[in-house]
Image: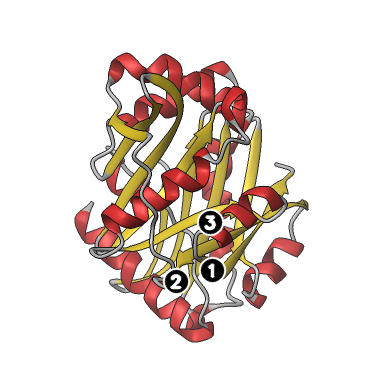
Amino acid sequence: MQNKIEAITQLQEICEAEKEFNLKLNLDMVTERDNNEFDFFHYDSKQLIGYLGLYPFGKKFELCGMVHPQFRRKGIFTKLLEKAKPLLVQAEEVLLNTPESSISGKAFIQSLPCQYAFSEFQMKWNQKTKGKNTANLTLKKATENDIPFIQKLDMLCFDLTEEEALSFANIRLNAKNDTIYLILAGTEEVGKIRLQLQEAELWIYGFAVHPDYQGRGIGSQVLNQIIRNEGKQYSIHLEVAAKNAHALRLYQSCGFEVYGEQAYYKFEN
């Protein structure tokens, strides 16, 4: 699988360099797969020129891919999608993802039975804002004993079903490059956050504060703590739904700036 990861990465760099956008390919999930069941490849001789990846989140699937700029308009991605369709019947919802600035990606999606669902901003800490001391909050590395609390938060804050939340908690808790932390106010568990290392980048995912404790500044305190602890060593990134104005303002107040946008479309399979 490692050779295929390298081939995907090389193709991604070629595609992104052409128009200077960022593809969201969830390569951390691809790396952790035991087989290629959810990955589809198209080669010209030995060169990878087309890739489609499926990313299951419980009964919801995300789908993203790419085709080498020199091999577009040849029906390659259509062929990859046809190969993937038998797996899509397992999903209750399928979301296709493309960078907002990708003309070719959006044109292809518009040729399919899709409806726009939402957009997501990619943000990066600008390294100008220094994290403040947050001595009243601590982060504790989660263990399997904490799965029920993690599951509950994902159901409350991300609208996941009980089954989806449990499956995702188990997967991410055991992921190689992920660490889930519980947020403690004193001894009280008030939230969680997942940090993922991608070489020199630290990504923030699954950030949730229990509804009973929202509105108390916990979000900004946790972000400031991560900036203080990790900002000198890594560039810090996160993603946020564009319609989540409250979260967007929170991240901006802590020094995060938008640098990319991903559009999601619901696929009527």
The residue tagged 3 is: 64
Circle number at residue 126: 2
Type of the residue with mark 2 = Asn
Q: Nearer the viewer, mark 3 or mark 2?
A: 2
Three-letter amino acid code at the position of disc 3? Cys
Q: Which is nearer the N-term, disc 3 or disc 2? A: 3
Which is more toward the observer, 209 or 172? 209
Q: CA distance from mark 2 to mark 1?
A: 6 Å
Q: Position of residue 138 (x, y in %)?
A: 33, 34
Residue, x 59% and y 60% (percent of image)?
121
Q: Residue at x 31, y 14 (%)?
A: 145
Q: Kindly identify the residue that appears in the image at 58 percent across and 43 percent down.
A: 85
Relative to 26, is 136 above or below?
Answer: above
Q: Position of residue 100 (x, y in %)?
A: 65, 69
The answer to whether the residues at label 3 and label 1 have Cβ atoms under 8 Å apart is: no
Which residue is pictured at 36% across the width and 56% down the height? Answer: 227
Which of pointers 3 and 1 lies earlier in the amino acid sequence?
3
Q: In this rendered view, identify the residue nearer to me: 84 or 212.
A: 212
Pointer 1: residues within 10 angstroms few (<14), some, or many (20+)? Answer: some
Residue type (three-letter) at the residue carrying disc 1 = Glu
Dot 3: element? strand
Residue 27 can be seen in this image: no
Q: Is residue 109 above or below residue 175?
A: below
Kind of element beneath mark 1:
strand
Cα gap from disc 3 to disc 1, whole angstroms: 24 Å
Upstream in the sequence, badge 2 or badge 1? 2
**In the figure, is residue 177 to the left or right of 224?**
left
Q: Nearer the viewer, residue 129 or 140?
A: 129
Pair 3/1: label in front: 1
The answer to which of 112 and 233 lies nearer the viewer is 233
Q: Residues within 10 Å of mark 3 (few under 14, many from 20)?
A: many
* Residue for badge 1: 257
